[in-house]
Amino acid sequence: MRTFAGHASKHELHGITVVVETDGPELFVGRCDDIDAAGVHLKDADRHVEGDGAASREEFLSRARRLGVWPNHRMLTVPGERVRRVVRLVEA
Amino acid sequence: MPYPPLMVKPMREELVAAGFEELYTPSDVDRFLGEKSGTALLVVNSVCGCAAGMARPGARLALQQGARPDRLGTVFAGQDLEATAKARAFIADIPPSSPSMALFKDGELVWFLPRHRIEGRDALAVAADLKAAFAEHCPAPAHVG
C-alpha cells in the first residue's frame, strides 16, 4: 500500500536521495525536500569538500551509493546560484 | 513526533501479515538480533510513502516462495524510537535510513538495502533484490512430498 500522496506541490524529486554538485569543491548528498527559486532543500544531508584531507569525492560517493550518508545536517539549502547539477544518488 | 498509532496501524499490519515480528522495545531487538545462529531479516519500517510504500510489498513478494530467512523482524522508525535506535546500534557503521532492510547471518550483517535504493522503484524490483540476497545467504526451503 502506498501511504501519503500529498506531496503534489513539491518538486518531482521530493523524497528522493540526490547528489547536488556545486560550482565549487562542495558536494552535498541528502534527501530532496524541494527545489525552488531559493535552491535545493535537503534533509538528512551530508557534505563533502574536495581536498579537505578526508575521503576523495569518488570515495565519498562510492560509499554513499552503497550505504547512504550520515545525516550531519538535518536540513540545509544549497543556494540555487551555486547548484551545477542535481542527480539521483543511484545515478551519480 | 510519532504519528498517531491509528495512522500507522495498516503499515505495521502489512509486515505482520507477511510473518514479521514487531519489535517494540530495545529488549525485543536484543532478543531478536542477539540470536547468533541462522538468518534474520530486519526491516526498518517507515511512514514515508516515497519509499516505504514499495518496501513493504517488496518484502512481502520476496517471501512468497524460494529461499527465505529463518526469522523476520521489524522496527518502526519514527514510532518505536528506542527499539529503532537499538536496532541501528547493531549496524552502527551504516548511516541510518528508513525504510531500509538488513540481513544477518549467524549474527553478522551480510546484506543491507538503504532507503535510496528503494526510492522510485516498484515492489517487484525491491523483491528481486531481496530474493537475490536470500538466495545467496539463506538456506533453500526443503522440498516436501
Image (cartoon, rainbow, N blue to C red):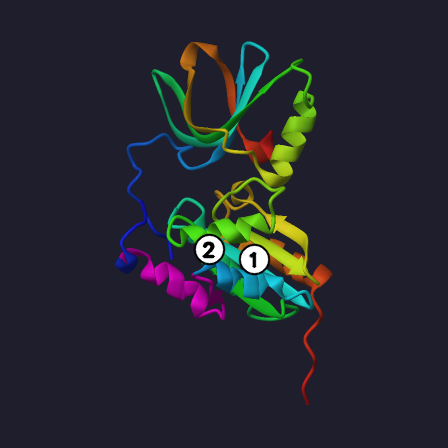
Residue bearing mark 2: B83
Residue bearing mark 1: B127
Q: What type is the residue that disc 2 sits on?
A: Ala
Of the 4 image quadrants, the one containing the N terminus of chain B is top left
Chain bearing mark 2? B
Residue drawn 60% across and 51% down? B90
Neighbours of disc 1 within 10 Å: few (<14), some (14-19), many (20+): many
Q: Circle 1 sits in a helix, a strand or a loop, which is it?
A: helix
Residue drawn 69% across and 82% down? B143
Say if the magenta span includes residue B10.
yes
Q: Is residue B61 above or below residue A34?
A: below
Nearer-N-terminus badge (2/1): 2
Q: Position of residue A75 (x, y in %)?
A: 40, 27
Chain bearing mark 1? B
Q: Circle 2 sits in a helix, a strand or a loop, which is it?
A: helix
Say if the magenta span includes residue A13.
no
Neighbours of disc 2 within 10 Å: few (<14), some (14-19), many (20+): many
Instruction: Specify start and end residues of the magenta stretch as a single range.
Output: B7-24
Residue B117 location, quadrant: top right
Residue drawn 66% across and 21% down? A57
